[in-house]
Image (cartoon, rainbow, N blue to C red):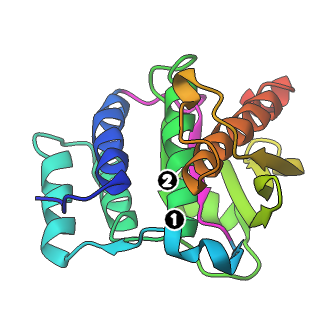
């Protein structure tokens, strides 16, 4: 079994509930998205105690893979499940940020496609060859979280996320922007405890997904 804790359990439960939806036939024109772990993640040191880190054992990772791949025979789905379980092996602030974004993008893209594939991937720092990465993982969109900076200011928390979105069909970066993230509780699907890191994670995933989807659907050539 996966370990039991606080926010960690909700993140794992959400992913376990959402990911099985992608075990459908996959159209090459549908979005196949990889979300890369932040290249740089800066947190005000007074906030470090509020961030929960955890690590899964080899057995827990293998149990996760076995559960996901039970009765699954498609190679690319099996590989994707392996990536997702392996990604959860070590969760800290940067991977948490990626995790929330992964969940929200699954939720929103499945409002448009019933066969989208989205998964997170941990990569090392340094330059990224998008075309090589796309060929390696058979994907057509790459979300590169280049930098996240979370600040503790007099009126609350604030974050800035620098992201790039790359498309395989056009072989170009379709979006390169800095996104401001607040710590407010906007309620509804974005409900969180105002003034917390959790709000930064949730709001960040919503704001970034909105910008990504606007860019994705901005030109027909991205979908040819």
Q: Quadrant of residue 194?
A: top right
The residue nearer to you, when weighing 166 against 14, is: 14
Image height of 182 relative to 111, above or below? below
Q: Residue 106: x, y in percent?
A: 50, 34
Range drawn in magenta: 25-38
Q: Which residue is mark 1?
A: 95
Mark 1 surroundings: few (<14), some (14-19) or many (≥20) residues within 10 A: many
Question: Quadrant location of the N terminus?
Answer: bottom left
Which one is in front, 202 or 195? 195
Left or right of 162? Residue 42 is: left
Is residue 46 positioned above or below 143 on the image?
A: below
- Left or right: residue 37 versus residue 130 is left
- How much space separates mark 1 and mark 2, taking CA atoms? 6 Å
Query: What secondary structure do most residues of the magenta stretch adopt?
Result: loop
Residue 36 can be seen, yes or no = yes
Coordinates of residue 158 in the picture (x, y in percent): 78, 55
Give whichever of 214, 217 is nearer the camera. 214
- Give the number of the disc on residue 142: none
- Residue on which disc 2 sits: 99
Q: Residue at x 36, y 34 (%)?
A: 18
The spot of residue 178 in percent (x, y) is 88, 53
> Residue 19 occupies which quadrant of the picture?
top left
Circle 2 residues within 10 Å: few <14, some 14–19, many ≥20:
many
Numbered disc total: 2
Give the SS element for disc 1: helix
């Amino acid at each position: 079994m996966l370990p039991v804790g606080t926010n960690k359990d909700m993140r794992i439960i959400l992913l376990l509930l959402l990911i099985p939806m992608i075990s459908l036939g996959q159209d090459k024109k549908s979005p196949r998205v990889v979300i890369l772990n932040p290249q740089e993640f800066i947190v005000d040191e007074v906030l470090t105690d509020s961030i929960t880190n955890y690590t899964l054992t080899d057995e827990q990772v293998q149990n996760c893979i076995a559960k996901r791949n039970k009765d699954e025979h498609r190679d690319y789905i099996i590989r994707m499940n392996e990536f997702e379980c392996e990604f959860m092996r070590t969760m800290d602030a940067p991977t948490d940020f990626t995790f929330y974004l992964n969940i929200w993008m699954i939720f929103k893209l499945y409002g448009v496609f019933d066969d989208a594939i989205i998964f997170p991937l941990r990569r090392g720092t340094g330059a990224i060859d998008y075309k090589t990465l796309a060929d390696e993982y058979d994907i057509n969109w790459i979300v590169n979280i280049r930098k996240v900076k979370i600040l503790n200011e007099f009126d609350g928390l604030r974050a800035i996320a620098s992201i790039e979105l790359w498309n395989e069909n056009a072989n170009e970066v379709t979006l390169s922007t800095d996104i401001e993230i607040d710590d407010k509780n906007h309620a509804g699907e974005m409900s969180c405890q105002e003034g917390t890191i959790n709000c930064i994670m949730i709001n960040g995933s919503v704001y970034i997904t909105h910008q990504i989807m606007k860019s994705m659907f901005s030109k027909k050539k991205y979908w040819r």
